[in-house]
């Protein structure tokens, strides 16, 4: 996984390797290459700025799925001084694709819910590639109800290719579990902050995605269906996903323009996967700032605004 490089990242990686080789050569042979290293460093910075400021929608979808991108627990480990994970839905099992628990950030007690993918094949199988079963959504709701009971704000971190579509999941009520979460989250009497940190696909994302504010990291996407799924339906060819992504307008910028996203969170130069610590620092500041704002709003007004927010989404013709 660590060696995966996207096509548009190759010029950047090549420059970084050249710089590293020069540093090693300079250290080993005592040759002064500082001037050349500095020149390549400037070229690297310009390349990063040029490439990442002109990404297509499909390239941003690829970045959102980057296997080296930080996942929920990568952020929790960096922004929370403690985290107590809670397990199980009290009905069937503990779904490893969703983590949920109590956390402390800068002395503030909150509840964190989030999808969790794996960093390698074994871990991905354990986490079911971030695709929750119904028990995952029921676990999330159980923990959200605890947050409501003890008056703690909720932060939901979304990163999933979708809810698991297997027969067992359907038999155990996948659609009902998601639908019930939508209903219950719409009226939770605590602030709910939604942040898309990777990919947000369909009901799998929305099942823990109803809140007072929707924030997206810069290189993320959020849609009712994946570009591949859309291409398979419309063009009978999943290979036309790049075309579908352009038509669907799935990126953070698109969603901001459509009035769905409330804020776009800037990522470190080159994307979140290139600097975990910096991205976590940015995310922590954004979380605290938004929770400060939301907790100033009377709870009845907050719930009314939340319901109105989702009622206004979309457009239609009669």
Image (tube, rainbow, N blue to C red):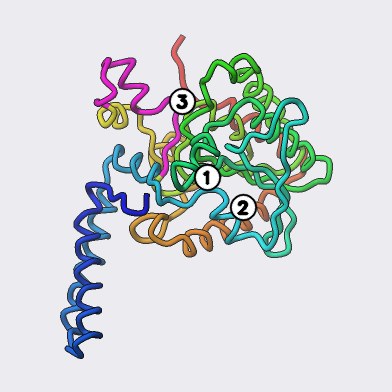
Residue range in magenta is 220-240
Mark nearer the N terminus (1 vs 3): 1
- Neighbour class for label 2 at 10 Å: few (<14), some, many (≥20)? some
Measuring from the top left, give residue 246's x and y in whole percent. Answer: 29, 31
In the displayed structure, does residue 312 sit left or right of residue 61? right
Instruction: Tell me the residue that label 1 is attached to.
Output: 215
The single residue placed furthest to the top in the displayed view is 318
Instruction: Tell me the residue that label 2 is attached to.
Output: 290
In terms of depth relative to the viewer, which is nearer, 98 or 230? 98
Q: Is residue 123 magenta?
A: no
Please indicate, yes or no, whether residue 260 appears anywhere in the rendered image. no
Residue drawn at x 56%, y 56% is 286
Residue drawn at x 77%, y 36% is 145
- Neighbour class for label 1 at 10 Å: few (<14), some, many (≥20)? many
Which image quadrant is residue 181 in?
Answer: top right
Which structural element holds mark 2?
A: helix
Q: Marks 2 and 1: in contact by CB < 8 Å?
A: yes
Single out the mark in the foreground, 3 or 2.
Answer: 3
Instruction: Tell me the residue that label 3 is attached to.
Output: 224
């Amino acid at each position: 996984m660590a060696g995966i490089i996207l096509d548009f990242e190759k010029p950047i990686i090549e420059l970084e390797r050249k710089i590293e080789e020069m540093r090693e050569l300079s250290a080993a042979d005592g040759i002064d290459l500082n001037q050349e290293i500095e020149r390549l460093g400037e070229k690297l910075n310009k390349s990063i700025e040029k490439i990442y400021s002109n990404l297509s929608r499909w390239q941003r979808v690829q970045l959102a799925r980057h296997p080296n991108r930080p996942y929920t627990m990568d952020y929790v480990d960096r922004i929370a001084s403690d985290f107590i994970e809670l397990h199980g839905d009290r009905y069937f099992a503990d779904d490893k694709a969703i983590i949920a628990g109590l956390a402390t950030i800068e002395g503030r007690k909150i509840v964190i819910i989030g999808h969790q993918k794996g960093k390698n094949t074994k871990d991905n199988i354990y986490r079911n590639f971030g695709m929750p079963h119904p028990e995952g959504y029921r676990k999330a709701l159980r923990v959200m109800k605890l947050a409501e009971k003890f008056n703690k704000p909720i932060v939901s971190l979304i990163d999933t290719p979708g809810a698991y579509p297997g027969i067992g999941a359907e038999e155990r009520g996948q659609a009902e579990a998601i639908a019930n979460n939508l209903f219950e989250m719409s009226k939770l009497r605590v602030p709910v902050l939604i942040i898309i940190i990777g990919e947000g696909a369909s009901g799998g994302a929305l099942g823990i995605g109803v809140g007072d504010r929707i924030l997206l990291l810069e290189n993320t996407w959020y849609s009712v269906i994946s570009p591949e799924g859309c291409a398979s339906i419309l063009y009978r060819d999943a290979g036309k996903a790049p075309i579908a992504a352009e038509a669907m307008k799935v990126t953070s910028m698109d969603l901001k323009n459509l009035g769905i996203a409330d804020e776009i969170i800037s990522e470190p130069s080159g994307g979140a996967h290139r600097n975990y610590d910096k991205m976590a620092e940015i995310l922590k500041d954004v979380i605290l700032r938004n929770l400060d704002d939301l907790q100033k709003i009377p709870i009845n007004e907050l719930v009314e605004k939340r319901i109105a927010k989702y009622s206004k989404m979309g457009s239609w013709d009669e």
